[in-house]
Amino acid sequence: MLSPRVFATGFAPESLEAFFAGLDAPRYRAGQLLNWLYKRGAASFEEMTDFPKALRGSLAGEIVLSSVTEAKRQEARDGTAKALLRLYDERTIETVLLPSRKGSYTVCVSVQVGCPVGCPFCATGLQGFERNLLPAEIVDQVLYFKRYLGERGAITNLVFMGMGEPLANYDNLLQALVALNAPWGLGLGARNLTISTAGLVAGINRLAREKLQLGLAISLHASNDVLRSKLVPLNRQYPLAILLEAARRYVALSGRRVSFEYCLFDGVNDSLLQARELAYLLRGLNAHVNLIAASDVGTSYLAPSRERILGFEVELRRLGVNVTLRRSYGREIAAGCGQLKSAVNV
């Protein structure tokens, strides 16, 4: 088993400089290594031709270039790619590459192995919780797809909407965000990074105080506490009144709009009455609603008909809600969170 302390993406520039000094190598080698990792997507030390051969050998004996290895990958005709990645302790996670516009891609990143929230419609939630991901394991999901794309396209956006509850792994997530955002790292703008939460209010409040200009998406899925407590068990701890208060505080402190994710389930949360209830719930809040049809993960929670989905969207628009009906990518490869891990049973 590998030690998690030796992953290259676990180093910040200062600690990497100290590491090279310990090898009696110039400190500027740290910047070169970071450039190979984040800008050029190197997959091996042998590619780093501006390093002396002896130093490349020393590095290969001391540092692991990536904390993830590919266990399985699936590709869809719409350009979506989904990878099951193996970690140093043999656990596995999923990450998904989504085409956003020509030549540009979004990566859906996992933050935990499994998930502690336990939503009954989610394949990851049904798997239970195993552990938090390390900062390197979060970053390396993105670099995995950077290497996969090569010259074919660029990763421009990240959404932390994969396996797990991001705000339950707050410190590791923030450390990963530094590397993904910093000029010495991947250099993605904070406004291109979106964190999704099932409604962990303590984390939302903490994130608001960071004032990082990150996007915040809240998985809502219901317009009243009775139904949401059934769909999102975290609602029992943080009911809608408390959650919406935290959302308003986030908008006030960050100046950013909040997105609410609303997954439509046939006969559960897709009626016109529930659309009206949702519009009333979000009144006066600088918010955007993303509607998406449910994925079939082997539960009783199935997608409504196209007619009911469109009817829900139209009713929200009629009531003045800013809403987008999201396209479902990668259905042919079960791109929904947790589906590949469940399918291969690892």
Image: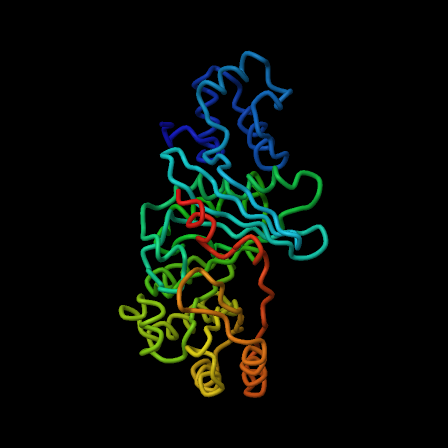
Residue in the picture at 42% in, 52% down: 163
Task: Classify residue 326 as left or right of residue 153.
Answer: left
Asked whether residue 283 appears in the rendered view, the answer is: no
Residue in the picture at 56% in, 28% down: 33
Q: Residue 66: x and y, percent?
A: 49, 32
Asked whether residue 173 appears in the rendered view, the answer is: yes
Picture layout, residue 318 above or below residue 112: below
Q: How many marks?
A: 0
Instruction: Find the residue positioned furthest to the top.
Output: 54
* Front one among 267 and 94: 267
Residue in the picture at 65% in, 51% down: 79
* Front one among 33 and 118: 118
Q: Residue 46: x and y, percent?
A: 59, 20
Task: Classify residue 157 as left or right of residue 169.
Answer: right
How are the colours assigned in the image?
A: rainbow
Picture layout, residue 254 above or below residue 67: below
Q: Residue 113: x and y, percent?
A: 37, 47
Q: Quadrant of residue 320?
A: bottom right
Q: Residue 310: x and y, percent?
A: 59, 79
Q: Quadrant of residue 44?
A: top right
Q: Quadrant of the C terminus?
A: top left
Q: Quadrant of the N terminus?
A: top left
* Front one among 107 and 332: 332
Picture layout, residue 85 above or below residue 30: below
